[in-house]
Image: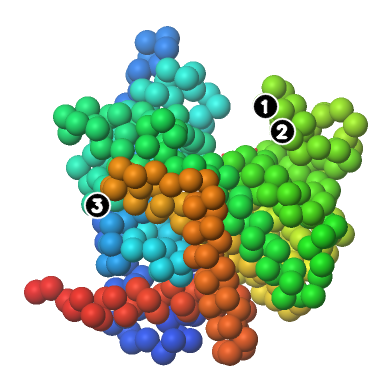
């Protein structure tokens, strides 16, 4: 394992929090070990009749504070270690925001862009069937992540329900509204990233009105973050996807429509093209990595000119990149705080499914704001009080709450 693997990074962050909180070696041993890891083979009959085998994973890192919760990623590069790292981050994130959940993550190592719609459905259903014994509304509740969306969640919910013999909407979140989804879930992660951005700007004494932003990644998180920031009066000056970056667009919505038709933002009328590296180094107030892990490294961090970095993606920064940004005085809003809007509204969806009572968009927005603002204030005060970074404060809060729950429950037998 290199020092830059997401699992090494996550373990290093945990070790630091355990040391800063002066927890015991017993605590370290329990906190650094995933509770259940499942690796499955997922056979897929391709449209041309060939049968291919894919690797699938589901990791339930913790169930101490409630059922585990976390996304399903369809991406060619995922493996067990990365899935463990992301499940660990979900654990601290749910504790930091005080949701009654442990943490989980799952996925299939597949390039979704190679699949037809029918192949995607068959793969999703077979993956669900393979992990079915360990998921459920009281056990572990998947949600969308990179490469999956509400269609995949509908197929997962249907596969689980067909096996149960009745409809079980609460088995996944991020579903379409007509299947028990929540208003505001599709925009929630972006809304949360935008709220975190606004608050970080205030802490740094920068007026959000007219502040400039560059966003790496233009998927579910990047796009809705851009929309929410524009609604708050910030100026999104550059965005990127896997093919490259663009500046000079006049409307984020029009750019998105172009990318839906052409598969990329690159080449949109009236824009100039940049490399992804050039986007990271733009002279903006805020940089938002909202794509994949390890975007900000020892190599890319020294060139960053933004005053604030808000982590929309999970684990976008290596420890070396983090240290460089800290020594350059950049305020980094860590992933487990900045992108927690998604799991907060997933929690609302699960609560609504359990109660069969659905909230208005206004109720969702207000409650999201309340929970996230509490976490932001907790992190800011802890960072100030203990003279630590926002990342360290967020981990200390999340980890200490899980450690407390372990202690109170005791060790069986
Ligand atoms: P997505 O699949 O919808 O979008 C990913 C985007 O990143 C795409 O625009 C893709 O082209 C781009 N991308 C991929 N590789 C890139 C590269 N090398 N350079 C630039 N852009 C690149 O995924 P998403 O749901 O938006 O998730 C993005 C990140 O946010 C992930 O780290 C995910 O774990 C995290 N996250 C997602 C949610 C959620 O609710 N979807 C919640 C919390 C965190």
Helix, strand or loop at label 1? It is helix
Q: Kindly report the distance in space between the C-alpha atoms of the residues bearing marks 2 and 1.
A: 6 Å
Q: Measured from the top left, where is residue 232 in percent x and y?
A: 74, 54
User: Is residue 2 visible to us here?
Assistant: no
Q: Residue under label 1, please give it.
A: 260
Q: Is residue 32 above or below residue 152?
A: below
Helix, strand or loop at label 3? It is loop
Q: Is residue 87 above or below residue 328?
A: above
Between 297 and 377, the residue placed more toward the observer is 377
User: Is residue 128 visible to us here?
Assistant: yes
Residue at the image position 27 percent from the left and 40 percent from the top: 131
The outermost residue toward the top is 48
Q: Measured from the top left, where is residue 13 in percent x and y?
A: 50, 73
Q: Residue under label 2, please give it.
A: 256
Q: Is residue 240 above or below residue 295?
A: above
Q: Residue under label 3, please give it.
A: 139
| Label 3–label 2 contact, CB within 8 A | no
| Label 2–label 1 contact, CB within 8 A | yes
Q: Residues within 10 Å of mark 1 (few under 14, many from 20)?
A: few
Quadrant hosting residue 413: bottom left
- Count of numbered labels shown in the rendering: 3
Helix, strand or loop at label 2? It is helix
Mark number for residue 279?
none
Quadrant hosting residue 319: bottom right
Question: First in sequence: mark 3 or mark 2?
Answer: 3
Question: First in sequence: mark 3 or mark 1?
Answer: 3
Residue at the image position 68 percent from the left and 68 percent from the top: 199
């Amino acid at each position: 394992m290199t020092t830059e693997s997401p699992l090494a990074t996550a373990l290093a962050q945990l070790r630091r929090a355990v040391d800063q909180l002066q927890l015991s070696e017993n605590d370290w041993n329990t906190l650094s070990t995933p509770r259940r890891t499942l690796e499955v083979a997922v056979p897929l009959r391709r449209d041309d009749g060939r049968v291919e085998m894919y690797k699938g994973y589901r990791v339930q890192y913790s169930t101490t504070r409630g059922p585990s919760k976390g996304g399903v990623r369809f991406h060619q590069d995922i493996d067990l270690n990365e899935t463990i790292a992301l499940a660990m981050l979900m654990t601290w994130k749910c504790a930091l925001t005080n949701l009654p959940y442990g943490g989980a993550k799952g996925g299939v190592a597949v390039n979704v862009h190679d699949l037809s719609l029918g192949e995607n459905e068959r793969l999703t259903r077979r993956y669900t069937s393979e992990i079915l014994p360990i998921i459920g509304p009281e056990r572990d509740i998947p949600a969308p992540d990179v490469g999956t969306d509400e269609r995949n969640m509908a197929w997962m919910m249907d596969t689980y329900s067909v096996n149960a013999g009745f409809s079980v909407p609460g088995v996944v979140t991020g579903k379409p509204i007509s299947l028990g989804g929540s208003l505001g879930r599709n925009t929630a992660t972006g809304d949360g990233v935008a709220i975190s951005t606004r608050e970080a700007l205030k802490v740094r004494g920068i007026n959000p009105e007219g502040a400039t932003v560059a966003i790496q990644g233009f998927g579910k998180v990047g796009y809705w973050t851009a929309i929410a920031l524009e609604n708050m009066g910030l100026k999104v000056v550059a965005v990127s996807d896997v093919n490259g970056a663009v500046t000079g667009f006049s409307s984020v919505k029009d750019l998105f429509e172009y990318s839906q038709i052409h598969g990329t933002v690159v080449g949109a009328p009236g824009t100039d093209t940049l490399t992804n590296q050039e986007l990271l180094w733009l002279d903006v107030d805020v940089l938002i990595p909202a794509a994949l892990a390890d975007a900000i490294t020892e190599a890319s961090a020294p060139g960053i000119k933004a005053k604030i970095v808000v982590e929309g993606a999970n684990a976008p920064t290596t420890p070396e990149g983090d240290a460089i940004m800290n020594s350059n005085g950049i305020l980094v809003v860590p992933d487990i705080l900045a992108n927690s809007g998604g799991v907060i509204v997933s929690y609302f969806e699960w609560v609504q499914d359990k109660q069969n009572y659905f909230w208005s968009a206004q109720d969702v927005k207000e409650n999201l704001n309340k929970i996230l603002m509490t976490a932001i204030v907790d992190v800011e005060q802890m960072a100030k009080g203990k003279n630590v970074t926002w990342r360290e404060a967020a981990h200390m809060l999340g980890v200490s709450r899980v450690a407390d729950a372990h202690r109170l429950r005791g060790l069986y037998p």
